[in-house]
Structure formats: structure tokens, C-alpha cells
Image (cartoon, rainbow, N blue to C red):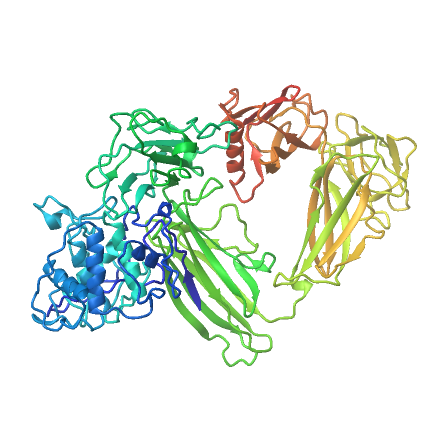
Amino acid sequence: MFSNTRRRIGVLAAVAVLAALVPTLATSPVSAAPATTAITTVTDAPAAYKACPTSANVPSAGFTDTTDTAVDCLKYYGITSGTTATTYSPTDTVTRWQMALYMTRLIDVANVALGTGADQGFTDISGKSAEIQTAINQIKQAGITTGKTATTYAPDDNVSRQEMALFVERMLDNLPAGPGGVSEAELVTGLATTYINSNCGSAAACTGVYNYTDIDSGSVTVEASNSIKELFTLGIHDGIAATTFNPLSDMTRAAMATFLNAALDHTNVRPEGLHLQASIYAGSTATVSPTLSVSYRDASFDPIASAPVDVMYWTNSTTEGNVAFLATGLCDNAVGTTDSITGCKIDTSETATDETGNMVPTANATDQLATIYPGADTYYAWTAAAGTIYDNDLHGEAAEADKHSSITVTANPAAASVRCSVDTPAYAKTATAAHTVAFGTTHTVTCQTVSATSGATAGATATPLQLMKMTRSQVFTTDNLTVQQGDTLISESTQAYTDATGAVTFTIVGPTDTAGTDVITDSFVITAVAPLTVEYPAGTTDHVSGRMSDDATDLQFSLIYKDATAAITNGTVTVTQTDNAGLPSTLGVTRSATATARDQYGNVLPAQTVTFTDAQTQIFSGAVCTGATPAVCTTLAAHGLSVGEDITLTAHKDITSCLKAAAVTGTVGSGYRIASTPLGTTFTYELTSTGYDINCSVATDAAAPMSYTTTSFDNAANNTRVTNTAGQATFSWVDTEPNGGKDTVTATTGGVSGTSAYYKTTTAASFVEDGNLDGSLADDEDSAKILSFDAAANTMLAEITHLGGAGNTNAALTQFGRYYYEYVWDANDQFNINATNGTAGTGKTEAAWETDVAANLTLGASAIDFINMVSYEVLSTGTSKWHTN
């Protein structure tokens, strides 16, 4: 099976496992018409602000049988007192007399007048307390109930979920919409007060904006069906992804708390003291603003009107010295909003709360990409006597919590896509999107809405209620007993909605192995319902763990469950080195490589014999060799070679007739050994009867030298190790090879190999791409390529290719080869982007330049990319200039 997991986030109306309130039933003899089409679009409009915001620090209700924050909120406002002083009894059902108390207490705290409670003709409530009788009569006066009959209320009957919907919907029709509450004016045309109603446009029935499949037929009345739909669109429900409402089931007290808590948010009920709240906000444009709401209430939750409120904000920053308040408590970088007459001061004509105890400040318009995202703005609201200057020590939350409130808000770019991944083992055997896994394992698919369809700049967005679908087809590929071979074991699909953070997860529980060599294949397809599409993380290549296939419509991957014996022959070998680059030295550089052996399931394998070998390529040093036999080579720099050492030759591209003879016995490939080193800059090859020289028709010279490389350790001596219990084997050596280049260490065990590259660098120098400036390698052209980029450490490793030739104009590079440079920058350097041939580009800050380079590195199939039209120029000591296209 696979299941959907959602996170409960306070920024939306509660949609967790709690159930809704207990309603009073209003009956209708007409059955609702069944839905004729499948419903896939959901409109959910929870209130923008909360009746119990985090800033209120609503205390625990003190019940020993629940920790539900919805229950805490109801207890705080006196809407419930529990079944005893210490219990709420969340699993108990709600009776009709309890529902009457829920309704009247909520209406009362919302400051809406109730009826007198005079006798409404119910003959079966006389045995109840005076409070209960009054409540029942009051909800009859308010039109919330019509009773079971004209003369009976049935106070001890349980309230069904459809009756609850009727109770709550009718109650909301008596309550004005508070700040951020949802109402529908056309349902109350001509009235001065707009009451809480669903945001269903002109269709009061809310047709087509719900998921429930069990409310349009059977014994569900038309009125009850419409009430359920209206509550759904108000965000008053106990699960946005639920496909059944269970209208005939009894309402539980836990569910009642969930429904009433969400309903409270739409009203003018707010906690004691001054509280500032902000809406979630997003936009496809750069500049967006939240909406803000200030509420001010006394200890009885009654509005405090005409209170002057000053609102200021501070754009969060990590820059030294950029702080909201000085050490003295006075405002520093915190500034007043546009409707604050004087920031950080209560003016005599300051904007004040209205008769409902509310105020709507004007929020700051912020650039969500450059300023806010992924940072934040902090808003502060406070009240005091006219003429008071704000001091954070005197008026901040710690000093005057009832007169001060702050909130940090983050802008959310509009979602452009949903990015999904699957957590298969990091080193499991993978072929494209087919992952080998063990029987009985569990895996998780995680999807997150993002602000761009690809690239490193795509940040997570808080986009709730994006519908995601996953289908699964499980087939018995190989049955050890041949009984079920080819059978489809599972064929199912599920859907789930992203939570308040824009995330949703699916859990995949794998099959349990039976016996023998069974193979079961699980195939999955993930789709996102319009308007968004689904994608796999940008820059991820095939044949790696967690890979999915993306055809621009959906994502596909498969899990192949096997019970074959774990073995290195079906597994992987990975190699890491203590460093990835460094300057070569004839004095010796201590290096170390560690190989890790894993089986096909990604588990480490001990007791494996690993052989380490080494090969250096892409050198930049060379030698001038005579055309005689034997050839004597004079190197352009000190070679550091010793007699008997392996050496590999690479002829210059302009000398096409250089052909190596047969390999010397005991060397790797078609290599040679050093016969003598008369000087530190000369050497000869070992002579044999079959081959000893490079057999060139012409001698090489300094303009077109012979390229050569050696191994950094002897490939035939003491280079085997055995993996430990962690599946690791380590080989260390002292590298005295003085020449630069790419040095690749290979570790092999059981016929499976892994490699790791080490780059021998030269001193960083100025460079510029020559030729046609398109990043391609052509004759007489230099080209730059980034191998690694670390913005946090301000370093990058670059490969500069020089193809030489008479037409080359770069005097800094005097010979053919590939050079490796490690570059370091800081804020004192100069940075430009979008450089073109002949222009310097646009000047940027260090951070902006780093962001641009990092974003461009993700283009293509890997994180390594050419730097087109790039130059690095040393301006002075400690100052350099960078240009990137």
C-alpha cells in the first residue's frame, strides 16, 4: 500500500484528524440530486486570520484526555468547559442539548445579541437545566434549529454530521464576517451587515468545489448538502483531501472542536490585548505585499475602539549593523509603514482602532525575490499615549505584551511547478529510473511546489491545495514457484493535496519476500493536476539513486524488489580523496583515497579486496624530444622522474606521425619506463628489443612539445587493501610527481570499479577566452570550464584548455595543454555578469554574481559547465575582476 502524509500547519485552518462541531438538524423532505460528474477542482477559502493566533499564547485547556489546540481555543473563549474539570471526552458524541450550548456561547463571545430565550414551545426540554433550556430556545429564535418537530427538540439525541453542518451554517448566518473572514454579499443583498457565507461566487449551492462523494444522494437533504459544501469552501472541515463526509455518522466532540475553531476565525472574535496578524501572500510579480490586521480587545474579549496604533517594519538582514533597534531600544532600521505618521512614535492624529476594535495597516511593498525571498520582514504594532516615542525596552513584547505585537512575514513567489523525489538508497543499483531495492523496505516520495520549472533558483513556495496523484502497478516479475509469475498484485491510485508549506508525501510499503529468487516490480506514475506540472529535480542525471523519468507530463520510476544474495558484482564502488585539488611538489604531497564497496541494495560490504591504480591525463607540461633512437627528452620544467617509473606519452596534435611502439613489459597500457635521468630536466626511455621510443618522424620543440604524464604511485606495488566493517578501504601515498594535470585514482574489486579525480593545479593567473568566444574548443583558442564552485568558501576550481598554434594571441599560455587553477575571491573584487565580446557586462555585488554563476552551472545535464565569454583579471594585490556571460 502507499499512503498520503500531510503536515498540519497553523497558517491554514486546522485540517488534521480532529472532527467538527455538533450541529442542530434542520430537515428537508427533498433528497439532493446526485453528482453527475467527477469533481477534481477544490476551492478552499479559510479565514485569513486566526481567533487564536500564536501571539495570543492561548493556554492549555488543562484536559488530561486531549492536547488539541482547537479544544484549547474553545476553552479560552468559554465555548466549552469540558465534560469534567479535567476531561473533554473527545471521542464522545455531541448531543443536541450540547450543540445548543456550543452555538449560543460562540455567538455570545462574538458580541452578537441573542434572543431572550423565551419558551419556543418545545415540550421535551423541561428536565434540562435553565442554561440548557435558554440556549435551546435562543437557537430557535435565531433560526438555527426548527426542532425535531414543531413541539419537540429531542435534546438527548446525538447530532449527526449533516445536522452539524446545518447548525453551524445557520449560526454563521447570524454572525458578521470579521477581519479576513469570508462572506458573500449577494446572499444578503440590501443588508448593511455582511454575514459569514461561503465564497462560491453566484452559486449558493457551491456546485463542483468539494471532494465528497456521499453528500448528493440518499438521505442527505438538499439543505444539508449545501451546508456541507458551504462549510467546505469556508475551510471549515476535517480534511481537505477527504472524499467522504460521512453525513449520517454521529458528530464527535473532537470533530466539533475542529469545525468550531475554523468557524471562529471568520468572526470578529479575537484574543485579549493587542495582536498583529498577517496573511499568507504570493504573486507572480516581483513586488507583493501581505495584508495586515490589528485587533485590540479587553479581558472580556470586547472591542477597544479609538486606540492609536503605530505600525513599523524592519527588513530582516544579516548585514552587520543593520538591526531593527539600537542597544538603547530606540528604532534604528525599523521604519514606519506608509500610514504611520511618524515611525516609532504615537502621534496625536495616529490611525486608531475602529468600533469593532480593529485596524488595517498598510503593509510594505517588498521585492519577493531580491529582498524578502527567502528572507523576511518583521512588522511591529504598538499603542500608547499620544506623544510617546517607541523604546523596545519599555514598549516591546517583553514589557507590554498586552499593548505590543510583532510578526515576521515571508513573501511566497507564485508556484510554477511541483518537484518530486524518491528516497531510494543512496547507492542502490539503478538503471535510469529502475531502482533495485530489498523486500520489506519502505520508501517515501516527497513533492514540493517551487517557484520555477527548473534550476537552482527555484525555491520552495507555500502553495497549499495543489492536487497530486500517484498510480501504482505491482507485477510479480519472477516467481520462484512460477505460480504467480506475470500476475498483477496491486493496481491502485491515490490523490493528495499539498499542505500549507506546499509539500505532500506518499509512503510506499514494499512487499514481503516469500522465498527463493522472487522478483517483484513496482511501477509508479506521478502527476500534478492543472494548473501546475510535475518535474524531477533539475540537473539530476540518469542511472543514479532516486532518479525518476520526466516526460514533461508526468514522472515515472520503478522499484524492483529482489532477494538475490548481496554481492559486489551487482553493486558499486565509490572513491573519495582527502582533497580534490592542490599544487604539485617534488618534495611530496601526502594523498589518500578511500574506496567504499556496496552491494546492489546500497549496503556496505566488508572483506572485499580492493586494488588501487592511478592514471594522470590532461597535462600541461611537456618535453622537447630528439628524433634519434633512442630519443632524449628535455623537459620544459623539472620533471621529478626516477629510473623505473611509469610514464605515458601523448604526442602533440600537430605531430600526427608519432606512434608508440609495443608496450614495455610490466607497464600499464602502452606505457614506458624511465631508463635514465641524467639531469633534472632530461630523461630517456627504457630500451627493449621491441620498442623503446616514440618513433616520431620529426623532433618536437618548445613550440610543439611532446606531452607526457606519469602515475602518482606505482600501479604494480603494494596497492591492494581489504575493506573493513564499514565497507571501506584506504590507500595512502606520497605524490612527488611535479607536473600538473588530472590525476584519476581507480579502485576495483570483484570486477566493479569506481574513480575519483584529483586536479594538480598551477598558480592562478589572468585568463581570457580567445577565438570565437562560444565556449567550444577550437584550434588556437582558450576555453574556461568550472569543475567545482563553492560560494560559501569563495572558491572555485577552473579548467583552462589551451590548444596552442601560431594563431593564439594569449601570451600568458605558452604551450599546449589543460591547466587547473583554484581561484579565491572576496568582496573587494569586481564582479560583472552578461559580458559580451567587447563589453564588460553588468556590475553586480559579490552575492549576486555568485547566484548567477551557481544558476548557470545547473544548465545542461551536469553541474559542470563552460564559462562563456569569461575573463579573470588580477587588478592589484588582493583585487581581481570577474566577467561571466
**Horizontally, is 424 left or right of 753 in the view?**
left
Percent position of residue 509, x then y:
49, 67
Residue 208 showing in the rendered view: no
**Horizontally, is 863 left or right of 256 in the view?**
right
Residue 398 showing in the rendered view: yes
Percent position of residue 715, x then y:
81, 49
Q: Nearer the viewer, residue 2 or 744?
A: 2
Residue pictured at 47% horizontal, 64% vertical: 508
Q: Quadrant of the N terminus?
A: bottom left
Q: Which residue in the rendered view is the most extreme toward the top?
A: 876
Percent position of residue 161, x then y:
24, 67
Quarter where residue 580 is shown = top right
**Horizontally, is 690 left or right of 418 in the view?**
right
**Horizontally, is 377 left or right of 518 in the view?**
left
Residue pictured at 43% horizontal, 26% vertical: 332
Q: Nearer the viewer, residue 264 or 141?
A: 141
* Total numbered labels placed on residues in the image: 0
Please determine whether, in this image, residue 834 is positioned above or below residue 550: above
Q: Nearer the viewer, residue 363 or 701?
A: 363
Q: Nearer the viewer, residue 302 or 497?
A: 302
Percent position of residue 524, x then y:
45, 62
Please determine whether, in this image, residue 83 is positioned above or below residue 422: below
Residue pictured at 70% horizontal, 59% vertical: 726
